[in-house]
Amino acid sequence: MPGWKRRELTEAPLGAFLDFVNTQVFPYLRDLGHRPGATYRQRVIGMIFANKERTILESETNLLDAIDRVDALSRAEISDQHIFLLSQAFEGLLPRLGEKANDGGQFFTPREIIRVIVRTVNPQLGGTVYDPCCGTGGFLIEAYKHMMTQNPSPTQVEQLKTETFWGREYANEAIPICLANMVLHDIDLPRIWHGNTLTGVATDGSLFEGAPMQFDYILTNPPFGSKEGKDAQAQFAFKTGKAQVLFLQHIIDALAPGGTCGMVIDEGVMFHSKTAAFLQTKRKLLDECDLWCVISLPPNVFVNAGAGAKTNLLFFTKGRLTRRVWYYDLSDIRVTKKQPLTLAHFDDVFERLALPPDDPGRISERSWYEEIETIRRKKYDLKAFNPNAPDNSDKRTPEELIAVIRRAQQEINEALQALVHDGVGPGSL
């Protein structure tokens, strides 16, 4: 921060720097996006600072040090390699939000799960990508990386950077992280809508202008366990306070004909059918879309994000009726904080998915088909019950088990008698 303003503030009483940043700089940045003729970048900056009232740096010494370091960085030649390192460092902070069990954990989906979903859905150039609860932007960023490997033309690159990736997010604290994360990953215009997706009430929808009514690809992880009131429920045909069920209805409606969705869902939604809205929403899914894959994940996949819910991955394409569902069961894999689920655990999934649907290789100890008639008979219970899993249960009868216990007791008695005979007993100790 060189020049006359710094000299002026240096000569002013203590506290002048902080006052200048909080009362002049921040308001100026908040207003950038609302000015006539604002550029894409100005609109993004305005949204990043929309809810920032003051700097978190309370020491003027620390503030000046931070300003000097940013100024030195901005005046240097920054290569693509530097941007990559900055974005990697930024992403490295996101898992820690969940590890510390603070508010950031709810916005973090393990990167390996995101990559599995993106690879399975395989979004193609020319299509639009949408996440209705985008958190810190992980799905949109991975989709951008995936589509950039498809040798886009200069025109397609520009489209990827400005018109392809659309998201909605409600939480104030997630919005600036999401925007900064996407910009650091070279998405020039993050098309992020700030507000409640389920009620449709916007806090700031300026970056979402020109959004399509429906999207070619939806990649998402709706929040677990969230509750919604009557304002949100009024927007949907099947009313419930369970946010995941409302999000599933929103996703089906927001998906373009022929469009594909890959999403995370709480297993409770899969098997619960006693509540009318749950049953009706799953029937809507199977009637309006082809649910072509369900992957049953192990418990604790989201343990590093502060959530212990058992989850599944759903993949479906809109516009054709579900005839049968291909299941893959990974639920027996042990997952801990230090042993997370990795992309390698899905190698067999990808190999079998690459086979034609009628290929016998689709079936294994971990994978099977469920016919739609069976699902309807079970009142739309979509939970994975693996019929091909090896039966490792103990097949011995009660009589056989009692005989084993008696033999073991006899061996113990004989060993004790031998110890006494050898002079080893309470009196010899």
Image (cartoon, grey):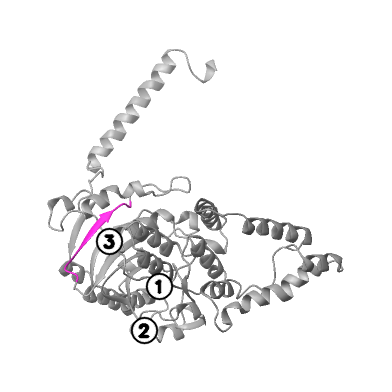
Q: Is residue 325 magenta?
A: yes
Q: Residue at x 56, y 64 (%)?
A: 103
Check disc 1: other Cα within 10 Å, few if <14, some if 14-19, many if 20+. Answer: many
Asked where in the image residue 296 lies, by quadrant, the reply is: bottom left
Tell me, yes or no, whether the two marked residues, 3 and 1, touch with CB atoms within 8 Å.
no
Which of these two is toward me, 203 or 188? Answer: 188
Which is more foreground, mark 3 or mark 1?
1
Q: Position of residue 120 (x, y in %)?
A: 29, 58
Q: Which residues are magenta?
A: 322-331
Which of these two is toward me, 403 or 272? Answer: 272
Asked where in the image residue 220 lies, by quadrant, the reply is: bottom left
According to the picture, the residue beneath numbered tag 1 turns out to be: 163
Residue type pointed to by label 2 = Phe
N-terminal label among 3 and 1: 1
Which of these two is toward me, 59 or 128? Answer: 128
Secondary structure of the residue carrying tag 3 is strand
According to the picture, the residue beneath numbered tag 2 turns out to be: 236
N-terminal label among 1 and 2: 1
As drawn, is 92 to the left or to the right of 121?
Answer: right
Q: Position of residue 259 (x, y in %)?
A: 27, 71
Q: Is residue 236 magenta?
A: no
According to the picture, the residue beneath numbered tag 3 turns out to be: 294
Secondary structure of the residue carrying tag 1 is loop
Secondary structure of the residue carrying tag 2 is loop
